[in-house]
Image (tube, grey):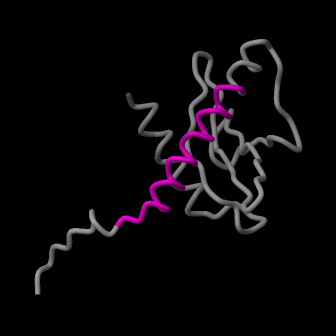
Amino acid sequence: MSWFQDYSNSLSSSFLSQLNKKIDCTIAIMSNMTYYVQKGESLSMPQSRPMPSISKRCHELRINDESQTWRIIYRLDEDAIVVVDVFAKKTNKTPDAVIKRCQKRLKQYDAI
């Protein structure tokens, strides 16, 4: 038995389609958000809420589509909107794993 498995042929087109849709939607949403933030507008509840448990200036953008509830974790820097994570929200509380992952990513980003 081989320890290596080649899964490249088993990736379903529906999985790849969903992944592309998620990326496209995130880019479109963040582009719109960037436009309004640059005009001096701000997002607040219920669309966006602060996430101080992750970091200062971090927020959670709330998006509902026909089948899921999505969250985009982002941080507003002086020169950028840093998208930290995108995930499907399944519980009321943001999972600890998501918070830790976001903190780690921001630490890595800030080290650059």
Give whichever of 51, 16 is nearer the camera.
16
> In the displayed structure, would residue 70 be above or below residue 61?
below
* Quadrant that contains the N terminus: bottom left
Q: Position of residue 39 (x, y in %)?
A: 78, 12
Extreme residue in the bottom direction = 1
Q: Is residue 1 above or below residue 86?
A: below
Inspect the magenta stretch and tell me whether residue 56 lies in it.
no
Q: Position of residue 43 (x, y in %)?
A: 82, 31
* 84 horizontally vs 34: left or right: left
Front residue of 24 and 42: 24
In this picture, residue 16 sits left or right of residue 34 = left
Which residue is found at the position 80% from the left and 40% from the top? 48
Where residue 4 appears, as percent x and y from the top left, is 16, 73
Q: Is residue 66 above or below residue 27?
A: below
Q: Magenta part of the protein: which range?
A: 11-32
Q: Is residue 30 magenta?
A: yes
